[in-house]
Each structure stands twice: as structure tokens, then as C-alpha cells.
Amino acid sequence: MKYIIKFIILLFPWCFVTAQSVNKMPGYALLPMKNVSEVMMDDEGYMWYALYGGGVCRYNGYQMDVFKSDYRNNMLIGESNTVVKLLEDKNGNICFGTHRGAYVLKKKDFRVMPIDTMLIHNRVRNMCITANGTLWIDSELGTFAYDRNYHRLHHTSVPTADLFSNNASNGRISYAQRPSVGKITRYDGKYVANGFSIDDLPQSLCDTLTKVSCVTIGTDGLCYVGDVHGLIVYNTKTGKAHRAPVVHDNVRGLAKRSRGGIYFISASKGLGEYTPDGNVRIIGGTGFFQIASDIKGHVWTSDLYGGVWRCDINDGTLAIDKEASSRNGEMVKDMVTDEYGHLWFVTENLMQEYIPDKHKVRLLTVTNRNIMLPDFRSIVREGLNMVLTSDSAYVTLSTADSHGSDRSTKVCSIKVDDEMHFLNSGSNSIEIPANATVVELFLSTLDFTNSQDTYFSYRIGKGEWNMLRRGENIISLINLSKGTYTIEVRATDKMGWMSETATRFTLKKLPHWYETWWAYSLYAIAIVTIMLLIMRNQRQKSMLNLRIRNLIDELERSKNIPKERLLEISIIDNTIGKTESTAKDNNELDKHNVVNAEFLQQATQCVERNLNDTDYKIERFAADMSTSRAGLYRKFEEADIEVKPNEFIRTVRLRHACRLLKTGEYTVAEIAYRVGFSSPSYFNRCFKDVYGVQPLQYKEQ
């Protein structure tokens, strides 16, 4: 008997231990090492871990950020990754002690700095902060005190045991975790509705129906049935039934009308209304599959793509409500409204509650492995509860839990390509380089209990809200253009309500060098310079064409006047009313003009002898003039001919082209080849540059 008593005594403590509920620390599975020496939560709400051999870690509910010395971070926290003490100072920075010194992680820029270089190679045994902000460090060298700026105050070689007595570690780590709130309860067995069903219809009426889709008792006591051929109105008191007019196709859903009658949706008519006096009003729309009505005179419908539409019956307006629509674009399987006017609907993967007046959304998911949400196909209102039903089970959800509170959303860190940037509590903006390709924003509500059930929503500027998947917290932005982007983020609370207040964050992507203001200034200067050069070139071209026309006229005049006559006319014109000295100078000028005229005639004759030769270029022209290429250019300058030799050849060709055009004997193409041009198109372009019109137009003139 005494052995049995001893066995019970030994077994009793183990029974007591196993009866307790043990919760793991948040993020424990993500720690790089499981040897945790200390855990704390800072003023912002982040969890910090001191690891024995693994450095310092920060947990935001989704990702674990590790600060330690390795091949990637070099000597980030000194020579040792064994952290024995962890605390937060009065400035909000994280101070920690290792086997090789004491360090501070400044949240302003997340740099790790040694507190005192004298302690770098010495072991820290303990640390604490007093009420006035003084930091005390107990090390192998003794006890040190530091002010808020980490300036050493004094040093004593005798450890102050009383100072660290209340801060001594007991060798155990404890963490209190709030229990999750259970909201959904499953009941095995088929749900039995209290309302009217098709089983209550008389057999004579059922024989006239084909593929019934919905049955509803209206507020007027009449029974409304929808089948593939339309809407049937059945009076349960008299036993009479008739089909509603106008509606002659598949009726997919029915919703009660507060003043009697029914709202319906059909395949071709869309949303419609049947009044107690037998009239049918077609409101419109198409592609609706579910319908519900609320106490405020609104009718709700859903389409194939998860869109939820709201109709105001008073004015008949029908418009999509983007806030109420399915977040993932999933088709709505069923929808209903509660006594508060809230809209409830169920999709393949979530259940949603929507408050129209506040545009507030609550997303509900199932974490119980015994409840598979895709198995439930309809939702029924039963008093203050909503009931999800399937073929073999049903789930109840109390609408009394329909309240929520705003939750602050934090942007914890930003990853630009492969470089991580940590943000402090006061930082709401960041600049990213111009060559950045992928930008990732890491979000958190610092609710470690419900992090995997939280939905995040974001929008850029005034765009539409985008919903991340349940448990995801990363916003990925790819190939952003230069500029400033305002990103608003919000999240659901533990009840599933989406926060009304959004956290704003500014992201500025710097421009490339060729997109900066000074680059644009250079572009403007270059454009202006090019335009001036073009204008100058056009002006020079116009002056050249003018000189060519003048040369053509001069060639015409000089061809018909002999050299003796040129000299005689020049002498007579220049000696009338002149003095003897002036006449002498003019005679020298006239001799020069005669020489120029002779040179001009000689050059013209050389070109005319080879007029139809397209290969007659400046080299052959210089040989015919008994000079070199450079000598030909020099003689043209001495003869005061204002065009270059190659332009002179083209001028003679164009002069003869004008003569041939006036005769009307040849086409433009024939004339082009006769005067030595390589192609008619080049001839047309040169002719228009000089005369301002096409050869054909000149010919017609």
C-alpha cells in the first residue's frame, strides 16, 4: 500500500504540469537558433530576442530580422554573437551585452555601435537602466555608468550587487499570450430551417414547375417560386397560383419586399420588382446570381466575378459597390442582410460582413481544421445569428460580435532589390535609387496572436484598394517610374474589421542622371542649338540658291556679249563725270571684270561639253580647266564667283534644264538624264531648292 501512495505522490506533480496550457513564444519557429537568453517587447510593440550564439533578433509578426556578425554583415555586433542581456533605453534604442562588449542598436538608422570601446574584448555579465536614464553595465572589468548619450560617468571595480538584484535573471523565460477568440462553432448534422420550402407546396402546383431555383414567403403572406420559366405567385390561403407577367425566363433568386411583393433576378431581365397589385418593374442589369434586400430600401445583387451591386429602389439607380465586392474576385455563393442592415455573403474561401453606411468591411476566415469553408454553400439569418449550411453540417456566427476598433498598421522595413532598410517609428518616407527594380514593403500590426488571420489592404495615390491574401504582409512594387508615391495601408483587427484609418507612407524614386533637371537643361540647350543651326543652314541654303539664280542670269547675259563690247561698255559707264584718277582705277577694275567674264565663259563651256555625263565631277572639271582641285577653288574665289565648283556644275545643268522645259519636247525624267542628273528624284529636289517649284509646275508656267 505504501508503494502505491509513493507512486501517486510522484505522479501528482506531473499531472499538474500537463494540465497547464503552454503557448509558444511568437516567432519561435523563425529563430535561427533556439537558445534564447532573453525576450522583451519594445515601446513600438516589436518582439526582441537575445540568442546565445545567434545575435539579436526582431520579430514583427511575420518576418524575423537578425542582427549578428557573419560573412554578410562582417563584425556587426562585434566578435561574439552570444547575447546575454537585452533592454531598451530611454531614447528607444536597443542596448545589449555580449561576451565581447556592450552595444547599442540605434533605431534612427539601425546602426550598431559599441557603447564603450574599453569593453569590446571583455564579457558583459549584466545591464540595467535606472529611472533617471542612467545605463549601468556590469562586466569583467567592473561596473560602469553611462548617461543618455552613452558617455561614461564613472567606473568602480567593485560590482554593485544591489543595483542588479532586482534585474537578475532567474534562468527561465516566460511569455503570456492572449488566447484567440473563438467565433465559429460547428454543428454536425443537416441544418433544419424554420421557414417555408418547396416541400410545403401542393403537388398540383409542383407538377407545373420545372427546375425550381428559389422559394420565398413574402411579407404579404404569398409564396413566390422561381423556376426556369419565370415567377410563380402562390396564395397559400386560397390555393391559387399564377405566373407573373413579363418575366418568362429563368428566375435565379428572390428577396423580400417590405411592402409586399418580391424582388427577383432573372437571366435576361436582370433585377426586377413584383408589386402586390401584380405589376412588374424591370430595373435592369444582367449576369446576377444572388440577391438580398435590407431594411433601408436597398437591394443587393452579385455577379459572376464577385462584384456586388446596390440598387436604390426609390430612384431605381443600380451601381456596383467596390467596397462591398468580393476581395479576391471570387463568385458569391449566397448573400443575406441582418437586422442592422449589414450585408453578409460567403465565397469559396471567406465570409464577409459589410456596413453600407460606414463602408466598413469585416473579413472572416476559418482556422479550425475541422471546418472547411469551401464545403458551405449558403448563409441563412436566424435571429441574431448567421448560419452557414452544407449538406452535412452547419456553422453559427453571432452578429452580436459585429464591432471592431481601428488598428494601426506599420511599415516595418523596406527591401530594395536585395538590400534591407529598417524604419523607425517616426519614419514615414524613404528615397530609393534610380536603378532599383523591385521594392518590397513589409507591413505589420504587431498583433502576434492573430497575424496569420490578418488581411492587409493598400492603395497608391487615389487609386483603388488592393487586398493581400490572408496572412501575407508584403507589398511588391516592380519597375517604378521616377517620382513620389503616396502609399496608404490598413489592416483588419482581431474581429476581422478593416481599419477605417490608413497609415500613409511616402516612397520617392530618384531619377536617372538623364532625367534630372540639369539633364533636361542640357536637352533644351541642345534643341535650341540644333534649331539655330537648322535655321542658319536654311538661310545659307537660301542665299546659295539666290546666288545660283543670279549666276544663271549672269551666264545668260555674258554668253551673248562679246569681250570687246564688255570692255567698251565698262569704260564708258565708269568714265562719265569722273576725274582722271578715278577713271584710271575703273579701267583696272574693268580689266579684272573682263578676265572674270572670260573665266566664267570658259568654265561654262567645259560643263556644257559634258552636260549629259552624270559622272562629270569636280576632278574632271579641274582637269579641263588646266588646274588642280584646290587651284580650281582658288580661281573661283579670284573670279568672284560666289558658288563652289560643284555647285557651279549643278547651276549650268539646271540652266539648260529650264530651257528644255520651256520647249515642251521632253518629259521631266528625260530632261533630268539629258542635263546629267543621276535620277529624276534628285533632279526634282535640286530644281525645287533653286526655283521653289517642281519642274512640272515650271513647265506648265
Image (cartoon, rainbow, N blue to C red):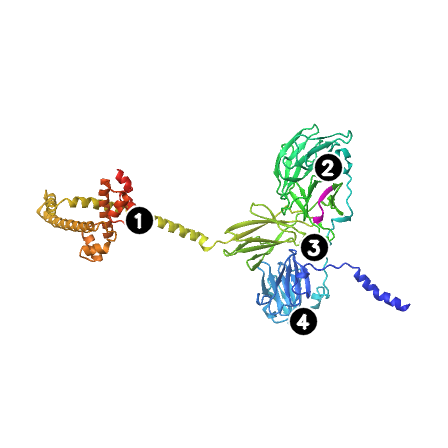
Tell me the distance, in whole angstroms, between the alpha carbons under discs 4 and 2.
87 Å
Highlighted magenta segment, given as a residue range: 373-380
Kindly identify which residue carries mark 2.
Answer: 215
Nearer the viewer's eye, disc 4 or disc 1? 1
Q: Is residue 40 left or right of residue 536?
A: right
Q: Nearer the viewer, residue 200 or 465?
A: 200
- Sequence-wise, the earlier of marks 4 and 2 is 4
Find out whether the residues at labels 2 and 1 contact each other: C-beta distance under 8 Å.
Answer: no
Nearer the viewer's eye, disc 1 or disc 3? 1
Which quadrant would residue 579 be assigned to in this image? top left
Nearer the viewer's eye, disc 4 or disc 2? 2
Q: Nearer the viewer, residue 105 or 181?
A: 181
Instruction: Report crowding for label 3: few under 14, some 14 to 19, many 20 or more residues within 10 A (C-alpha).
Output: some
- Sequence-wise, the earlier of marks 4 and 1 is 4
Tell me the distance, in whole angstroms, between the alpha carbons under discs 4 and 1.
91 Å
Query: Under tag 3, what secondary structure?
Result: loop
Residue 585 location, x and y as percent?
12, 49
Taking 83 as reference, is 453 above or below it?
Answer: above
Nearer the viewer's eye, disc 3 or disc 2? 2
The reply to whether residue 294 is visible in this rendering is no
Kindly identify which residue carries mark 3.
Answer: 449
Kindly identify which residue carries mark 4.
Answer: 158
Taking 454 as reference, is 106 above or below it?
Answer: below
- Sequence-wise, the earlier of marks 3 and 4 is 4
Residue 483 location, x and y as percent?
50, 50
* Type of amino acid at the residue the image marks with label 2: Val
Kindly identify which residue carries mark 1.
Answer: 537
